[in-house]
Amino acid sequence: MLKGLRTRTGSVRGRRGVVAAALAAVAVASLGAVSVASAGPSDKPRPGHDRALQAELEAIVKDGSVPGVLMSVRDRNGRVTDYTAGVGDIRTKSKVPVDGHVRIASITKMFTAVATLQLAGEGKLALDDTVEKHLPGLIRGTGDGASVHGGNMTVRQLLNHTSGMTSEMPLLSQGILPVKDRYFEARELLDASLTREPAFAPGQERVFSYSNTGYITLGLLVQKVTGRPLAEVITEKIIKPAGLKETYYPGPGDREIRSPHPRGYLFEKTDKGEPIPGKLVDITRFDPSIAGAAGQMIATPSDINKFLVALESRLLKPRELAEMRKTVETALFPGWRYGLGVIEMKLSCGITAYGHGGDADGFQTRAAITPDGRAVTIAATNDEAGVMEVISVFDKALCAK
């Protein structure tokens, strides 16, 4: 399933996924000139290449459960070092492409949040507006979700996952394989989720409850306010101004990933749905519309780092950036808090950072930037294995001197 696109509790992969998403946090910094150095296991080390980080990446792919890993590190002076380990295709044994395209899953939420905050900065909506004001009559629960109503939640609450909207994704109840070639409209995703019981009833104390449905709703809100498709808004207002050449929102029917890219894998499952270690299924090609505004996008690691840098300097006004960093408690890990589309966390070295992460079938990604401008994005080509190992390297790369 698209683990990074649903709640991280109540499933075999639940707790692990939320941990992964939360660890993808981080602040923002100034944009500098960038030079590129890459290194793989057989490459001669180049300036900026960290042998210790490379060794840890090699350890992640050693047993083959995670076929490949790619990581891009941008230091505080703007120099970029790209790392790879493992193979990009288990059939051909080809190398992992340096800075290849990957599904970034819930990192998409940062883009959706920025689009929403830009509208707030332009005076076209207020963060404390009710959802009903902009999408009248749309948010009406049915069945077990009968108490859900757009008048009982605000734009801010959608952004920081305190709206109470369900954490479930009913159309993914059987996993990705039965629906991998299905195209879904956002309204179809929303209507399915509105049949589910909310995380808490109106009038109860609001708490953090990770909801992809909330971000599907934000995508519809952005489209309603702008009168344009969400993909166009993100492209014209975020991707182009940030100078992102390798980041895109797949169009209707687009099931491929632009080249170069590694292939993504799932474990083969038993009849009971249990992973079979050592047996991998290629899940590179599927329709990401099941994720929509909560996790549909594709990018390269270095482009995500550029996005994080541009976020502070160009994409949002100071007031909206400050709003983005107003956080709520999450119960993810001690010291971790969620803002408006970003997670605030403390790294092992004590630095506070902001960013996000995501898990789509076949890919786990983590992206972050420190206050002094060190950015790291890492991606692995199996989201069901090596999760904590990937997070450990991610943390060390951000903390490295």
Image: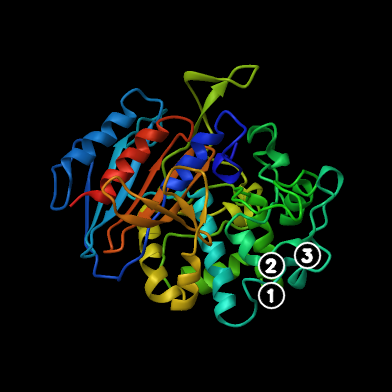
**Residue 196 drawn at (x, y percent):** 77, 43
- What kind of residue is marked 3? Gly
From the top left corner, tell me how far across and down residue 39 is, in percent.
21, 45
Q: Which residue appears at 71% of the width and 62% of the height? A: 153
Question: In this picture, is 316 found above or below 13?
Answer: below
The residue type indicated by label 1 comes to Val
Asked whether, in this view, residue 15 is left or right of residue 221, the answer is left
Type of the residue with mark 2: Leu
Query: Residue 278 appears at what percent x and percent y?
Result: 44, 19
Mark identifier at residue 33: none
Total residue callouts = 3
Label 3 environment density (alpha carbons within 10 Å; few <14, some 14–19, many ≥20)? some
Under circle 3, the secondary element is: helix
- The residue lying at 14 percent from left, 44 percent from top is 45
Kind of element beneath mark 2: helix
| Discs 3, 1 touching: Cβ within 8 Å | no
Which quadrant would the N terminus be assigned to in this image?
top right
Q: In the image shown, does 306 or 102 lie closer to the viewer?
A: 306
CA distance separating discs 2 and 3: 14 Å
Question: Residue 85 vs residue 4: left or right?
Answer: left
Q: CA distance from mark 2 to mark 1?
A: 6 Å
Mark 1 = which residue?
A: 225
Local secondary structure at mark 1: helix
Residue bearing mark 3? 151
Q: Badges 2 and 1: C-beta atoms under 8 Å apart?
A: yes
Q: Which mark is residue 221?
A: 2
User: Which residue: 21% across, 49% down?
Assistant: 400
